[in-house]
Image (cartoon, rainbow, N blue to C red):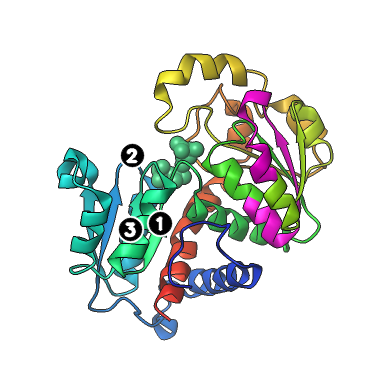
Amino acid sequence: MKHLLSIESLTAPEILEILNLAATLKATRGHEKHQPQQPLAGECWGLLFSKSSTRTRVSFEVGIRELGGDSLFLSSNEIQLGRGEPIEDTARVLGRMIHGAVIRTFKQSDIETFAALSGIPTINALTDEEHPCQILADLQTIKELRGTLDGLKIAFIGDADCNMGRSWIWAAARLGFELRLACPELYCPPAELIARARAAGASIMITESPEEAAQGADILYTDVWVSMGKEEEAEYRAAQFGPYQINDSVVAAAAPGAHVLHCLPAYRGKEITAEVFERHADAIFQQAENRLHAQKAVMTLLKS
Ligand code: CP
Ligand code: NVA
């Protein structure tokens, strides 16, 4: 693995290798006699962010430090990228100075261009198309909660065409669990993408009914209705997504003991009720913690 640009670009063995290493790094974190190697020793990684972040930024900054490296946070507003310097030039400059890049931006093609032209390991820290780091942490969490990913029914309720919905589609294609998507027709991922994922082995059911998607599901998952960059559509989206909330009646349709997950940040009263959120807060914050472990595993494997 030279880069982590998407879940789509990973193989099943690569995903499982990341999850196994993430579990080891989590189990041995802070244990003196199990100090992991420091694969980033002597390195400086850049975090290029064009969108806000709490979890991703902090988990990468801490993770890089724990792996022996240093990091630079480069908000696009504060570097020339934000004033129109092309990504191609930014990549060729930074590739000569830093040792790895973690990029949060809009266009997937920008991180692909950066990876191709910089010559340094490049990680997708969220684009409009995918959020692979989040999905890896989610898969790690589900393995911890359920013991396995095999045979699970996972229901994603909400904006299935956002980066999280699309990342779930590729995770289903690679790992073989059953994915149900409940979304308004307007926010279904493109038919071409679904067809490609199904051809790659994904079992995907699409419905406009959250209850139908939740029926007997082991995991209920949601994300914000208004992803970063879509703020001008907030009012329209609130009307469209109103029925796509994880609430008591959706949870009641799921399998007994089903887990509810959320990538965060959460908007209570919108995509999830406050009551359901608090009842499942332990698992949700376990997901957030696992960002650190999963990303340390990714960076370690990019250096191996
Ligand atoms: N889930 C997630 O990526 O959170 P941040 O936007 O806070 O990084
Ligand atoms: N779909 C959300 C994910 C936030 C972590 C967004 O892009 O804003």
Instruction: Identify the mark at residue 114; answer none if there is no mark.
Output: 3
Query: Mark 1 belongs to which amino acid?
Result: Glu
Q: Check contact, mark 1 vs mark 3: CB within 8 A.
A: yes
Q: Residue at x 43, y 66 (%)?
A: 3
Q: Nearer the viewer, residue 3 or 244?
A: 3
Tell which tag, 1 or 2, sits nearer the viewer.
1
Ligand 1 contact, mark 2 (Cβ < 8 Å): yes
Span of residues in magenta: 170-194
Question: Marks 1/2: CA distance?
Answer: 21 Å
Specify whether tag 1 is near ligand 2 (CB below 8 Å).
no
Query: Disc 1, disc 2: CB below 8 Å?
Result: no
Please, is residue 113 above or below residue 235 in the view? below
Give the residue type at disc 3: Phe
Residue tagged 1: 112
- Could you say where residue 180 lies in the image, as x and y percent from the top left? 75, 41
Q: Which residue is mark 2?
A: 52
